[in-house]
């Protein structure tokens, strides 16, 4: 399939969308445009997940998203949950593990928002909209994609890394299986110190 770039100038705004380009190529193109077009505005994206725990695929998704936007809001989903089998880590613990990883990677163009669960899809999206302003949503979750597409947002599917998921990691943690290779080093070091 042919790879291409579509750049549209509207007034003093340059909007960049890159399809099927490598993460490196996207970053280089954004950097080039910033140098050539001083009027390139700050474009913001949203990446929501429960991050129970934050793993290598999440990190790859953050890097991919920041190849397309200048600032990324990382939404901590089900932020009210902790200490359960499905949501073992608190919102503070999740933010700490993500911050440690992104600091090691030299990534600073992000902010956190805490997103609690809501009774309806519309209420949930409205809650997110009240917490931050964004133009693109990055997700690999079909439900999240549906929620934001129904509100008219552009949604970019993130790539899934084969054999890596938070569910699988939690299962292996519980059963004593191997999981450290699925998460960034700072995550497994932190969790190992806690005896997990």
Image: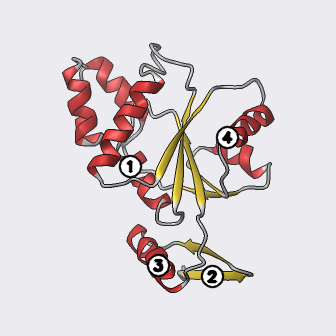
Q: Do the residues labelled 3 and 4 touch (CB within 8 Å)?
A: no
Q: Do the residues labelled 2 and 3 touch (CB within 8 Å)?
A: no
Q: In which quarter of the image is residue 16?
A: bottom right
Q: Quadrant of residue 93?
A: top left
Describe residue 138's horizontal placement relative to residue 145 as left or right. left
Considering every residue shown, the one lying at the far top of the view is: 83
- Answer few, some or many: residues within 10 Å of disc 1's Cα (few below 14, many 20 plus, some between 14 and 19): some
Q: Quadrant of residue 96?
A: top left
- Label 1 to label 4, Cα distance in Å? 21 Å
Instruction: First in sequence, mark 2 or 1: give its number.
Output: 2
Instruction: State whether residue 74 is above or below residue 72.
Output: above
Q: Nearer the viewer, mark 4 or mark 2?
A: 2
Instruction: First in sequence, mark 3 or 4: give its number.
Output: 3
Q: Name the residue under label 2.
A: 7
- Label 2 to label 3, Cα distance in Å? 11 Å
Secondary structure under tag 4 reads helix
Q: Nearer the viewer, mark 3 or mark 4?
A: 3
Q: Which residue is drawn at 44% across and 76% down?
A: 31
Mark sitting on residue 81: none
Instruction: State whether residue 83 is above or below residue 43.
Output: above
Mark sitting on residue 59: 1
Q: Mark 3 points at which residue?
A: 29
Considering every residue shown, the one lying at the far bottom of the view is: 36
Q: Mark 4 points at which residue?
A: 143
């Amino acid at each position: 399939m042919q790879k291409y770039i579509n750049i549209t100038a509207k007034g003093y705004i340059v909007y960049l969308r890159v399809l099927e380009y490598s993460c490196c190529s996207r970053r280089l193109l954004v950097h080039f445009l910033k140098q050539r077009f001083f009027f390139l505005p700050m474009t913001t994206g949203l990446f929501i997940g429960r991050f129970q725990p934050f793993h290598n695929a999440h990190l790859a998704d953050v890097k991919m998203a920041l190849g397309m936007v200048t600032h990324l809001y990382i939404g901590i989903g089900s932020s009210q949950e902790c200490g359960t089998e499905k949501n073992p880590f608190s919102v503070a613990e999740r933010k700490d593990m993500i911050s440690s990883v992104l600091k090691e990677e030299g990534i600073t163009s992000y902010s956190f928002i805490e997103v609690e669960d809501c009774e309806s899809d519309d209420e949930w999206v409205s809650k997110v909209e009240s917490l931050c302003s964004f133009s693109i949503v990055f997700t690999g979750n079909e439900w999240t994609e549906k929620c934001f597409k129904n509100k008219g947002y552009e949604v970019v599917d993130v790539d899934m890394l084969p054999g890596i998921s938070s569910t699988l990691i939690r299962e292996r943690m519980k059963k004593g299986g191997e999981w450290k290779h699925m998460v960034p080093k700072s995550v497994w070091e932190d969790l190992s110190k806690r005896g997990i």
